[in-house]
Amino acid sequence: MVAPDAADESWYAIDADWDELYVDGEWVAAEGDATIPVEDPSTRETIATVPAATESDVDAAYEAAAAAQPEWADTSPAEREQLIQEFIGKLDEHSDEIVDLLGAEAGGSRIMGETSVQIAMDHASEAATYPRRLQGDHKGSNIPGKENVVHREPAGVVTVITPWNFPLNLTMRAVAPAIATGNAVVIKPATNTPITGGLVFGKLFEEAGLPDGLVNVVTGRGSDIGDRVANHPESDVVTFTGSTPVGRKVAANAAENLATPVMELGGNNAHIVTADADLDAAIDAAVFGSFVHQGQVCISINRHVVHEDVYDEYVERLTERAESLPVGSAHDPDTVVGPIIDESQRDEMLEYVEETVAAGATLETGGDTVALDGVEDSLVVEPTVLSDVTNDMSAACFEHFGPIAPVIPFADVDEAVAIANDTEYGLSGSVHAGDLGTGKEIAERMDTGHVHVDDQPINDEAHVPFSGTNASGMGGFNSEQILEAITETKWISLQHEPREYPF
């Protein structure tokens, strides 16, 4: 693959060449001949083919990263900042093409694609400030005449294992900070979205002028190369966004080499609505928080926990809003609810709905797929509302990861908090309680990484810490959290006066 002139936007089109890995600043063929088809979830057609990397390809990527990183770590803060700014310029220049890529590869609506680019730009812009924020420290000493100096240095090689739901911005939040702080990177994108979660970063950084070897992209199935990526001896930090079961395995593999794991895992987020809530605002938030990108968001609303006094009205109004949403192909600019990423995800969420109804819940609307012209076995799932739900039913106790809104009643705030906290997860949440003070009091009782009062759970700002509790992860992204994860401290003491020893 040869980079065209920067003005040639076709290099970022879905029908461009995506059939090589990006290793050591070169587009190279994988060692084997195996390939992986990329399917458009809207049309079910194969739209691109990417290499299926081998473990030897993975080794080559880490060798290149480890070789390139020391020289990059010695560059000035201004040089690293300038590189990230160049990268931001390329991302902005090609943003329309990347939005199209997200629609074709991830099934993202126009809203999802534009939001992804916006959040990715925010993360890259925050990362551009990191080179000047890497600060050491001086500490006093208990020993006469000693000076303690603490340096902060890059960790080395950062592994970035990316998810398929928001591949662009969830890759950016690890890659841009790592490069900005003097690290090298190996990206292993999700099999469903190898382009927007991986290969597109190779193209953008190449255009931006990043030195060879600092960003490497290996596409492949997790079953073939996942373990080698997660526990590679050259890896110093492993970042991962995905399910809790897979995350536990990735973290265990990272620990074998004492690499630092940074994990954002599953969620089961509650949207608490009290009797005093502004129902107009609560339902506006609920519709966005449940149905944006088909509910395929780790921090989306998984459970609506609603006071019994307003429960019936809430269910009725939420159902009306769900039925009014434009549903269909991600290529239709009017679509709000598009396709699920693949049939396994679709089938699992529909099974949760069936099990929940069988357990006694009421299906208010949805619960099936939407036929698309010319598409066999559509992946579009109807916006679904379930009432009379209890916390132990499948659609509520599991992370359904779909356009599904189970609504659970409660009698008082203590019960609402108990319902919200009755899960192994603790990622996000939201509260509508009529006034901010009461909402904040409820938010403080919720056992989760972040809670949003008079809003919905889907929030991500690059300068604000982002982490989960319990089974929702370890470590954190954004702001100082990711800075600490991808750098290490070194203590240097200076003995300015002769020291007396006991022998």
Image: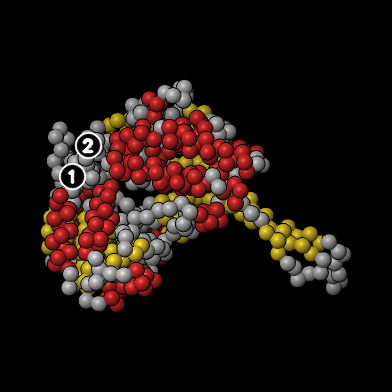
Q: Which of the 4 quarters of the picture holds residue 164? A: top left
Residue at figure coordinates x 85%, y 67% from the top left = 499
Residue 237 position, x and y percent, is 53, 50
In this view, 61 is above or below 369: above
Q: Amino acid at mark 1?
A: Pro
State yes or no: discs 2 and 1 in contact (Cβ < 8 Å). Answer: yes
Q: Residue at x 33, y 46 (%)?
A: 165
Q: How many marks?
A: 2
Residue displayed at 22% across by 36% down: 332
Circle 1: element type: loop
Which numbered circle lies on residue 332? 2
Q: Is residue 3 visible?
A: yes
Can you give x and y, in whole percent of width and height, for residue 94 in the image?
Answer: 41, 32
Q: Is residue 344 above or below residue 391?
A: above
- Which residue is disc 1 drawn over? 326
SS for callout 2? loop
Work out whether 147 lies above or below 234. Answer: below
**Viewer-side residue, 229 vs 100:** 100
